[in-house]
Amino acid sequence: MYDENKIIPMIIVFVILVTFPLWYNLGKAAAKPDPKIDTPVIRQMKEKKCLEPKATMKTTHMKILDEWRHEVVRGDYKRLYTAADGRVFEKSLQNGCMKCHSNKTQFCDQCHNYMEVKPFCWDCHIAPKETK
């Protein structure tokens, strides 16, 4: 009734094809990024705090930056951002974020390369000159 001479090889071929991406890339994973926050501006800060908590910045920085872009360029042109704790910051990638995170290659690029994300920030903005 069952043609086991065809079914079993087909199951083996199917399993190999389905699991191919897993075993082909085994051991090729990139190292986990370790973004550095050791910049001259951050070193001089008494309290090392970004505009929002670290966990929020890790997960939503792209959303915050995109909202800023829309608000400043196409929206109501409000240039100030009030953080959850009441501190006020200028909505600016270059004059705000990159002032502290001047080490773009060791901070931004590490994670973006790891995640294979190609943000379009630098299509309009000028990448900062890095200081060590």
Image (spheres, rainbow, N blue to C red):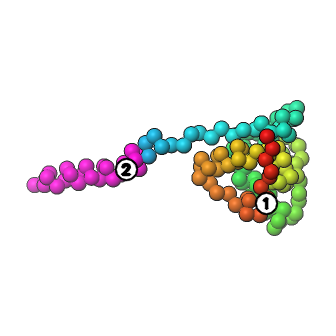
The disc, 1 or 2, on the residue closer to the chain's N-terminal end is 2
Q: CA distance from mark 1 to mark 2?
A: 41 Å
Q: Nearer the viewer, residue 14 or 3?
A: 14
Q: Is residue 122 left or right of residue 20?
A: right
Residue at 80% over, 52% down: 128
Q: Amino acid at mark 2?
A: Phe
Task: Quickly name the residue at label 2.
Answer: 20
Q: Amino acid at mark 1?
A: His
Residue at 89% over, 47% down: 88
Res. 15 visible in picture: yes
Judge the density around disc 1: few (<14), some (14-19), many (≥20) Cα neighbours within 10 Å: few
Task: Quickly name the residue at label 1.
Answer: 125
Residue 101 vs 7, above or below: the answer is above
* Percent coordinates x, y for residue 22 in the rendering: 41, 46
Residue at 68% over, 57% down: 119
**What SS does tag 1 mark?**
loop
Q: Is residue 20 magenta?
A: yes
Question: What are the residue bounds of the magenta stretch?
Answer: 1-24
Dividing the picture into quarters, in which one does residue 55 lie? top right
Residue 39 vs 6, above or below: the answer is above
**What SS does tag 2 mark?**
helix
Specify the principal SS of the magenta part. Answer: helix
* Percent coordinates x, y for residue 12 in the rendering: 25, 49
